[in-house]
Amino acid sequence: MKRIWAPWRIEYILQSKKEGCFLCDIVDDDRDRNNLLLKRHEHVYLLMNRYPYNNGHLMVAPYRHISTLEDLDPDESDELMKVTREAVRTLKKSIRADGFNIGMNLGKVAGAGLEDHLHMHIVPRWNGDTNFMPVTGETKVMPQDLCELWDQLHPAFNA
């Protein structure tokens, strides 16, 4: 029997599943640290993933509640890529990422956990970050508290 202790997951498990879009809710709230929102731009915003694949896993989302690339207007599309580039540059400097997985899951069959609000994932990677834990233990080790990381990244994105 395998047992993994992940107390941060209980908040997600126990929270009532509400209607609506968590990305829209976050952007309408002014508690950016609590919501892990790092920076607001004109057309998109940058936030940390609350259930990350890796330390520093970020997302870029348009303010508009849209689900497909075709729905992005040119200004949103341009800013989405500009902010993605800025995130890569800042993560390289701030947390010394060696590489990145960047992309979108568009539609349920493509693995989208949130189908209705398009967002770009930016997942930092490091040489050797795939060690024995995920390979043999099917467990991912997160080395840093999310709010601690927000405190580190927020000034870097807002300098």
Image (cartoon, rainbow, N blue to C red):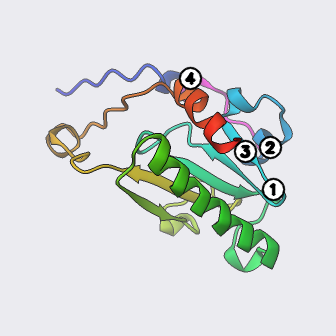
Is residue 36 or residue 5 the one in the foreground? 36
Residue assigned mark 4 = 11
Answer whether labels 1 and 2 touch (C-beta < 8 Å).
Answer: yes
Answer whether labels 2 and 4 touch (C-beta < 8 Å).
Answer: no
Residue assigned mark 3 = 39
Residue 74 found in image quarter: bottom right
Is residue 17 or residue 24 the one in the foreground? 24
* Closer to the eye: label 4 or 1: 1
Q: Amino acid type of disc 4?
A: Glu
x and y percentages locating residue 155 in the rendered image: 65, 35
Answer whether labels 3 and 2 touch (C-beta < 8 Å).
Answer: no
Distance from Cα at disc 1 to Cα at disc 2: 7 Å
Up/down of 138 relative to 31, above or below: below
Is residue 149 or residue 59 the one in the foreground? 149
Distance from Cα at disc 3 to Cα at disc 1: 12 Å
- At 57% from the left and 25% from the top, the residue drawn is 147
Residue assigned mark 1 = 63
x and y percentages locating residue 72 in the rendered image: 76, 74
The kind of secondary structure element at disc 3 is strand
Answer whether labels 3 and 1 touch (C-beta < 8 Å).
Answer: no
- At 78% from the left and 69% from the top, the residue drawn is 76
Can residue 103 be seen at all in this image of the molecule? yes
Is 15 one of the magenta-colored residues? yes
What range is drawn magenta here?
A: 12-19
Q: Main secondary structure of the magenta part?
A: loop
